[in-house]
Amino acid sequence: MPKPLFVIEDLHVSVEGKEILKGVNLTVERGEVHALMGPNGSGKSTLAHTLMGHPRFQITQGRVLLKGKDVLSLPPDERARQGMFLAFQYPVEIPGVKVRHFLRMALKASKGEEPSVTEFRKQLFEKMALLEMNRSFSERYVNEGFSGGEKKRNEILQLAMLEPEMAVLDEADSGLDIDALRSVANGINKLAGPHMGMLLITHYQRILNYVDPHFVHVLFDGRIVRSGGMELAQELEAKGYEWIAGEAVA
Amino acid sequence: MKQAAKGFSRQVVEELSSLHSEPPWLRQRRLEAWRVYEATPMPTLQDEDWRRTDISALALDELLPFAEAPSPHADSIAELPQGLCALLDKSRPESGLLIQHDSQVVHASPAEEAAKQGVIFASLEEAVGEQPELVKRYFMTRCLPPEHSKFVALHGAMWSGGTFVYVPKGVEVELPLRACQWLARPGLAVFPHTLIVLEAGSKLTFIAEQCSPEMDGQALSCGATEVYLGEGAQLRHISVQQLGRQVYNLGAQRHLLEGDSSLDSLIIGLGGELTKFFVESVLEGPGANAQMRGVVFGGDDQHFDHQTLQEHIAADCSSDLLFKVVVKDQAMSVHLGNVRVHGDARGTDAGQTVRNLILSEGAKAHPILPLEIEASDIRRCSHAATVGQVDEAQLFYLMSRGLSRRDAQKLIVDGFFEPVLEAIPLPAIQHRLRRAVDEKLGLAMP
Ligand SMILES: Nc1ncnc2c1ncn2[C@@H]1O[C@H](COP(=O)(O)OP(=O)(O)OP(=O)(O)O)[C@@H](O)[C@H]1O
Ligand SMILES: [Mg+2]
């Protein structure tokens, strides 16, 4: 049997001595889209950052396996080269660095070879068209002065260019108006394919009207307390997180 | 006098003046400057302006005050030394190029188009003979008199070579004029002077470069740049300093701005052992505007000290300063940024920002930004300084895209400088500076 693409096993994470994740378990196979929902402060971004190797988070227990190999000891750049990707909830500004230049550097770094200038341009404009982005966007400095929606699109553009095997999207939908949401969701649908596993972190069910996840999980107080299909997302939307809170205590 | 004896003295001043067969008035100015030099105490750490900059290791008595260039005339760029040749981008059309090698101007290609419009671009020594009235009026009088400071006085006594630019009323010079100082002789002190006069309504881009190969032994570059902007004149002024690691660079640059004139100046400091550089804009006429930008990158044990002045004398002027500084290893950067607003300068709008990025634990940056405001009715007077390391959140973001920590840091530093470098009109210089930055980061391919 081939090894699963991505496995999170009993993951415990602390920040400054406070335990945030209290034993998370999750398996994502190629071709699967998993939605992870949860209230504010439940630990969604903590999980996302930990998976990508942010140095602030201390792992006290557990394993994270990518294609069977534990990645927890690897620095973020090495994880990226092994095929991981994180779309940030709050993307960072890199003043003075053009989107175009940044993407070229990122491609070179993660793939190990530099695409030709013409090949790169062709690819870039294709992906930008897919996401309904204006070409002039690639001449702007990374995230500097971007609107919330532009930042999110820029994250998805990077996803499109880098074509990772395992993508974690931390609230790719928050702060988007309905048109932007549709084009971001559209992009996600086109990119998620048989070769990629995706963990779609979201707060609201809204984006799930456009993207069909295979599985829905609910993170509450550092644990996945419920897993199911789309019906779980709908139930959550109808009853609110209060409902889970009640159950978790019970 | 092919080469003077070591050290500076009144006798050297007289010899230099004779060597150039100078008219009595000029000889007199040299001697007066020498008198001021002698009367001014050597700066020490006790002086307010020099508190963090120690020049006691500079052996002035060991320096030669003058040396002829190895070949005093180069008709074409190809005849110049290789290292210098490499700096010049031959394929570009340029309206004028002047080169000073050590103490002598060895090449001056006329700005043909501009010359037809009455623009003068020549060595200062030549201008003394051909435009004595202009030089007499502007040279080290109102802009940078010897009393400015100790080393401006020394400069006034010892200068040789130099650049003279005169743009008549209403003339717009399309292509940049470029003056390059090449200091290649260890043990030498050079004193290049730049005098720029823009008459009312004229327009110019001027690029000044100071460069040297790596040399064995101390050297000194003690330059002075005086600029007069007439009513409504516009100047883009770019100064690039890529001197060798052993060179002390003690210089001053001062702009006098008449009404409605505008200055866009950029200082780039990369080379040298120690730099103390005065950069001053004096807004003398109403509605004048000065933009002063700077890029400084110190590595190893380099020391940079930029002392800037935005002096608002007339009403309704604006000035804006932005310096971006990166230091690594044991390097240190000092920025003493003065804003002075006189009592009559109503409606002043002055801002200054100094941003320092520290790449290593041993590197230091000291921004000191005093304001002196006498006017009561001003629009804005603000100052801001930041000192910080490369942002961890930025590093994580870039590394999450596969960039190594080193490449991520390089990208952040490049981006810090890029908006300033991008605005330089000659692409070849942009390219050279980006390479120099990468080299300093320890990343350049040989
Ligand atoms: N540096 C830190 N120090 C202390 N506590 C932290 C730190 N970072 C995060 N936390 C805490 O960890 C918990 C989880 O935060 P996290 O950002 O992972 O939540 P989230 O589920 O992504 O929330 P949101 O929906 O608001 O994005 C919160 O209680 C938060 O306050
Ligand atoms: Mg979050």
Image (tube, coloured by chain):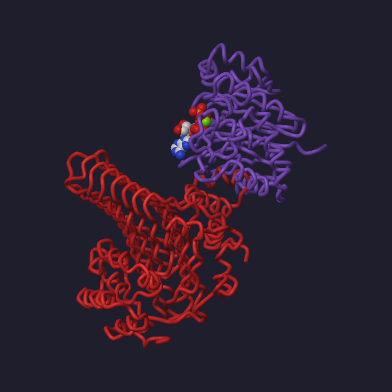
Q: Is residue A144 visible?
A: yes
Estimate the x, y position of residue B398 in percent, counting from the top left: 57, 45
Q: In the current view of this chain or complex, which residue is farthest to the right?
A: A1
Compared to residue B143, the image places residue B341 above or below, namely above
Count how many numbered circles sit on residues in the image. 0
Q: Is residue B384 visible?
A: no
Q: Residue A246 versus residue B110: which sits nearer the camera?
A: B110
Compared to residue A59, the image places residue B428 above or below, namely below
Residue at coordinates 61% horizontally, 26% vertically from top-left? A36
Identify the colour of chain A in the image.
purple
Q: Quadrant of residue B104?
A: bottom left
Q: Is residue A43 left or right of residue B304?
A: right
Q: Residue B164 versus residue A67: which sits nearer the camera?
A: B164
Which chain is represented by red in the image? B
Q: In the current view of this chain or complex, which residue is farthest to the top?
A: A238
Which image quadrant: the C terminus of chain B? bottom right
Compared to residue A244, the image places residue B39 above or below, namely below
Q: Quadrant of residue B84?
A: bottom right
Estimate the x, y position of residue A247 in percent, counting from the top left: 55, 17
Estimate the x, y position of residue B214 in percent, counting from the top left: 51, 74
Residue at coordinates 54% horizontally, 45% vertically from top-left? A97
Estimate the x, y position of residue B187 in percent, counting from the top left: 42, 81
Which image quadrant: the N terminus of chain B? bottom left
Q: Residue A235 versus residue B23: which sits nearer the camera?
A: B23
Residue at coordinates 48% horizontally, 67% vertically from top-left? B98
Q: Is residue A48 left or right of residue B270?
A: right
